[in-house]
Image (cartoon, rainbow, N blue to C red):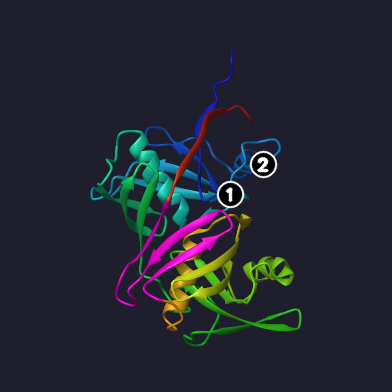
Amino acid sequence: MARAGLRFTKMHGLGNDFVVLDARIQPPPLDADRIRAMADRHTGIGFDQLLVIEPARDPACLAAYSIRNADGSFAKQCGNGARCIGAWLHRHGILAIGAEAKLESPAGMIGLRLLEAGSVAVEMGEPEFDPARVPIEAPEPAEIYPLDIDGERVEIAAVSMGNPHAVMEVGDVRERRIDDLGPRITTHARFPQGANAGFVRIIDPGHVELRVHERGAGWTLACGSGACAAVAALRVRGRVRDEVRVELPGGTLTIAWAGPGHALWMTGPAAFAFEGEWLGR
């Protein structure tokens, strides 16, 4: 008798790729070993994050979801993933074009608006700068924090979008030292939960360029929450405008934030790649 497989949908947001599982009726058996096997790009499906759609516990929400990184660890927020879930819900007849809905993310309730079949706007909440909430080890809030890395001192901003981010302004996001700095910042001791490391270059006040090394996933073609964090960190210092185009290796997102006291919105594409059945362990 043929072995039953695990049905999945492969999606991506600007090349930040996901496997989406429908667990609204029955949760699939998922342990860290199985997730790592699925995430392997040579012998598995390959993905940056696994998105598991679950029934909403809050009646105000259309659905809930959880996030697992490629290494099997849990994540609390993923902006590109949230857009993909919005597109997935539309494809399954649950969310209409032009409609707004609330989702339960691991970091709390978020809002989304389906602009068209391939474009989704997500309300990501208000950026959090309190060091205890990021979290980063610091005696008091600051716009910039020093990090010592192998005898070199670098300066970063720290912000949470439901997950921790370190944002470093650079003159060139392709600078070779960034390849080394990314993993070291992600695992720096001042971030007790680790951090996504974003390297941002300001082109003009309405346009920036960004690369992100994600905890649990490594370098990605795009990071939605990283784009939000980078704009928020620059916006509070008056470095960018209320609406900014963020150019990532995989494409462009639009981030809009009016400043403290307001929710931040991210708009960008969500695309389907293929559907399949996982027959591995």
Towards the viewer: 202 or 236: 202
Q: Which stretch appears magenta?
A: 241-268
Position of residue 112 in the picture relative to residue 157 (left or right) = left
Answer whether residue 120 is magenta in the image: no
Q: Residue at x 25, y 46 (%)?
A: 99
Q: Residue at x 45, y 84 (%)?
A: 237
Residue with the mark numbered 2: 40
Q: Amino acid at mark 1?
A: Asp
Q: For label 2, count other residues whose C-alpha is less than 10 Å away and answer few (under 14), some (14-19) or many (20+).
A: some
Tell me which corner region of the image, top left, top right, bottom left or bottom right, holds residue 206.
bottom left
The x, y position of residue 147, in whole percent, is 64, 81
Q: Residue at x 27, y 40 (%)?
A: 96
Q: For label 1, count other residues whose C-alpha is less than 10 Å away and answer few (under 14), some (14-19) or many (20+).
A: many
> Could one spot residue 132 in this view of the protein?
no
Under circle 2, the secondary element is loop
Residue with the mark numbered 1: 48
The x, y position of residue 94, in whole percent, is 29, 37
Q: Residue at x 43, y 49 (%)?
A: 269
Tell me which corner region of the image, top left, top right, bottom left or bottom right, holds residue 111.
bottom left
